Image (tube, rainbow, N blue to C red):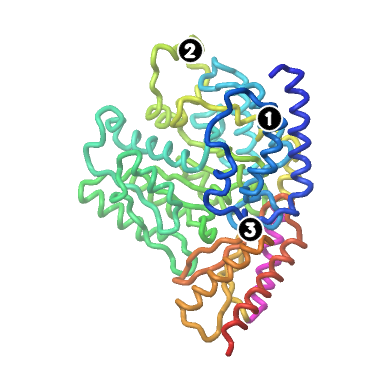
Amino acid sequence: MTPDEFRRYGKQVIDWIADYQEKIESYPVLSRARPGDVLADLPAHPPERGEGFEAVLADMDRVVMPGVTHWQHPDFFAYFPSGASGPSILGDLLSAGLGVQGMLWATSPACTELETRVLDWLAELLGLPERFRGDGPGGGVIQDSASGAALAAVVAALHRADGGAAGRHGIARRCTLYVSSQTHSSLEKAARIAGIGAANVRVVDVDPATLAMDPAHLDALLAEDAAAGALPVMVCATIGTTSTTAVDPVPAIGEVCRRHGVWLHVDAAYAGVAAVCPELRGINDGVAEYADSYVTNPHKWLLTNFDCTAMWVADREPLVGALSVLPEYLRNRASASGEVIDYRDWQISLGRRFRALKLWSVIRWYGAEGLREHVRTGVRLAAGLASRIAADPAFALLEEPKLSLVCFRPRWDGLDGAEADAATLRLMERLNASGDLYLTHTKAGGRVLLRVAIGAAGTTDAHVDAAWRRIREGTAALAAERTP
């Protein structure tokens, strides 16, 4: 493809994306494709001769779009948002156009130094501690996901706990990792990959009312395991759990970790970016004093398209010590000088894209003021929906939302728990099948709950109002079906 051809087709692609954004509400939120539908429309074999790009765009409409669930749709309430704003898309395009492989500072200094500065910017916007800045002992890095960051944190914590012995010789004793029942499954996966093993992931009790980790039980488990000869490696506290946005008491957990000398990883994948609003920074209480590593996802609620996970460490040495492997072909003068950061040593993979460009673009386009307005809108919309649910006797609200996730259920008078849960799931399936909105569910207190996660850039009061109306109508219709 020549530069002239790229220019011509590139304009068509930009127009295609802009047209999609303009008409996104005309699509059903959840794809109606059945298993195998997309495969059936794709040739079984690759073309022998190259095809024009017009054919690609035509098949985007004919083949791909029917199989797309529209994450940017303003009626998408299923999972936490996956931001894909205009400046983020353009920043990602710039990254793709440059085609940088930023594994080392030497392979593209701008890739490294822009990332360092942008992570410092974001730490400032979120009110995170000075020790997370790149000019100190710690620093920030963009990972592919909170799951990848969790694995990096686990191996760093293990390196610190055993002095690097596991990295050199393999794990020779029982090591333990501490989570709650509400912790993201990526922590168990990280324990499996790192060799700690799922059986050594200890599950700490939660407060039945708040679903937050119980520091006293954590303290008891750490003492018990250490007495039995185990090596406690890491505790994961969550700020905004996936299920219900429960917030673990980080200050109390941090005190326990400090007494036992255990690494504290704070997973704020969804909720952490809310701290861009000063009035919401209380969610990060204890992070400055106790967190060894901290993660939040701009690619969720901060208008940045996937993948872009921000991870900070208070001390980079255990992370680099665990992950640095230096073959001859990567040796260079800049790395040997010790004056630069090589982000390959801060992540699992060697290669890395120029992800910082899209986050840089987002922060510069919106500014702190615009980012705060976006987060505040989500919080306001969630609070409004929750107030209507709480006022309706046909529904039970789990709790007032902390941020922009609302969890609730129809009461289903006359049905026992299991029957009511089945009815709630039927309601969700019907609503999703309508194409008008997309919800997911969770379980809390032994009951099935519907989740409405607000945060898409285009979601307004009108969309939330319409979703609530459809939920009420769907509930009434399903209740009427079982009335004799």
In this rendering, would 264 be left or right of 74? left
Label 2 neighbour load within 10 Å: few <14, some 14-19, many 20+: few
Q: Which mark is residue 77?
A: 3
Q: Which residue is mark 2?
A: 337
Type of the residue with mark 1: Leu
Q: Residue 84: percent from the left, percent from the top? A: 67, 42
Q: Quadrant of the N terminus?
A: top right
Q: Residue 472: percent from the left, percent from the top? A: 67, 74
Rendered image quadrant of residue 164: top left
Asked whether the viewer can see residue 362, the reply is no
In the image, 284 versus 447, the foreground residue is: 447
Task: Check whether the beta carbons of the residues at disc 1 and disc 3 lie within 8 A of each other.
Answer: no
Q: Nearer the viewer, mark 1 or mark 2?
A: 1
User: Which segment is the magenta one?
Assistant: 375-393
Q: CA distance from mark 1 to mark 3?
A: 27 Å
Asked whether residue 384 is drawn in magenta, I would say yes
Type of the residue with mark 3: Phe
State whether residue 389 is above or below residue 323: below
Q: Quadrant of the C terminus?
A: bottom right
